[in-house]
Image: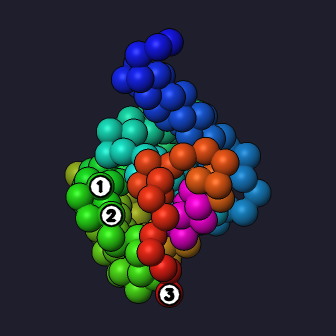
C-alpha cells in the first residue's frame, strides 16, 4: 500500500475493529462488575470507546455503534442496549471537542474538567434513557426503587465514566509510546 490515505484508513479500521472487539469482550468477561436491576457498572467497559476518542470522532462513533450492536447480540437486556446507544452521541460529540481543542490535553485540570463535562452528559443521557424506558411502560419498577435507580444511574454513571476516561487516557498515553495516537502525536507541552 503506497497510498498514505489508504494506509491511514486501513490502520484506523484495524484500530476501530480491535477496540470494538475489546469493547464487546469487557462486559462479558470482566469480573469487576456491579449489577443492580437494570443498572450495571463494569469497570473499564467504556475504555475502548473513550480510547477511540483520542484517534478521531468517526472512530469513536464507529466503536460506539459496533459495541451497541455487540451488546444487542450478547446481552438480552434492552435497557442496556439503549444505554449503550447513548455513547454514540456522548463520545462522538466529545471526540469532536477534543479534535477541535487538543489543548485540553495540555493541562491536567483542563483534562479533568473535560472529563467531568463528558461524564455529566454521558450519565445524563443514560438517566434519560432509564426514564424513557420506565415511563413508556417497557419495564416495571416500584416508585421508590425508580428514584433510587435514577440517582444510581446518574451519580454512579458520573463516577464510572470519569474512572473509565482516565483509564482510556492512560492507555492511550502508554500506546502512544509505541504507536502514534492521533491526538497525542504532539506531546503536550507539560501536564501539571
**Circle 3 is placed at which residue position?**
192
Image colouring: rainbow
Q: Residue at x 32, y 39 (%)?
A: 58
* Mark 1 in CB contact with mark 2 (< 8 angstroms): yes
Question: Crowding near pointer 1: few (<14 within 10 Å), some, many (20+)?
Answer: some
Whether residue 85 is situated above or below residue 192 in the rendered picture: above
**Mark number displayed over residue 125:** none
Residue 74 in view, yes or no: yes
**Mark number displayed over residue 102:** 2
Q: Which residues are magenta?
A: 165-173
Q: State left or right for residue 132 relative to residue 176.
A: left
Q: Residue at x 59, y 34 (%)?
A: 18
Please state the horizontal and vertical placement of residue 108, each as a whole percent of the image. Answer: 46, 82
Distance between mark 1 and mark 2 Cα atoms: 6 Å
Q: State left or right for residue 135 relative to residue 115.
A: left
Residue 134 in view, yes or no: no
Please state the horizontal and vertical placement of residue 44, each as a whole percent of the image. Answer: 61, 59
Whether residue 159 is situated above or below residue 161 in the rendered picture: below
Residue in front for this viewpoint, 67 or 72: 67
Question: Crowding near pointer 2: few (<14 within 10 Å), some, many (20+)?
Answer: some
Sooner in the amino-acid sequence: mark 3 or mark 2 = 2
Distance between mark 3 and mark 2 Cα atoms: 16 Å
Please state the horizontal and vertical placement of residue 84, each as a whole percent of the image. Answer: 42, 48
Q: State left or right for residue 30 relative to residue 118.
A: right
**Residue 24 occupies quadrant:** top right
Amino acid at each position: 500500500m503506497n497510498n498514505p490515505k489508504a494506509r491511514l484508513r486501513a490502520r484506523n479500521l484495524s484500530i476501530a475493529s480491535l477496540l470494538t472487539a475489546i469493547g464487546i469482550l469487557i462486559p462479558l468477561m470482566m469480573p469487576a462488575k456491579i449489577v443492580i436491576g437494570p443498572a450495571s457498572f463494569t469497570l473499564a467497559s467504556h475504555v475502548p470507546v473513550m480510547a477511540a476518542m483520542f484517534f478521531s470522532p468517526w472512530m469513536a462513533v464507529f466503536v460506539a455503534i459496533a459495541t451497541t450492536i455487540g451488546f444487542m447480540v450478547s446481552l438480552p437486556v434492552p435497557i442496556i442496549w439503549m444505554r449503550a446507544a447513548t455513547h454514540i452521541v456522548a463520545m462522538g460529540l466529545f471526540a469532536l471537542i477534543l479534535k477541535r481543542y487538543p489543548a485540553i490535553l495540555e493541562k491536567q485540570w483542563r483534562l479533568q474538567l473535560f472529563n467531568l463535562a463528558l461524564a455529566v452528559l454521558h450519565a445524563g443521557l443514560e438517566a434519560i434513557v432509564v426514564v424513557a424506558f420506565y415511563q413508556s411502560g417497557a419495564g416495571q419498577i416500584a416508585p421508590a426503587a425508580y428514584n433510587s435507580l435514577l440517582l444510581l444511574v446518574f451519580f454512579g454513571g458520573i463516577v464510572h465514566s470519569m474512572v473509565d476516561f482516565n483509564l482510556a487516557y492512560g492507555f492511550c498515553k502508554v500506546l502512544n509510546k509505541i504507536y502514534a495516537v492521533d491526538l497525542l502525536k504532539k506531546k503536550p507541552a507539560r501536564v501539571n
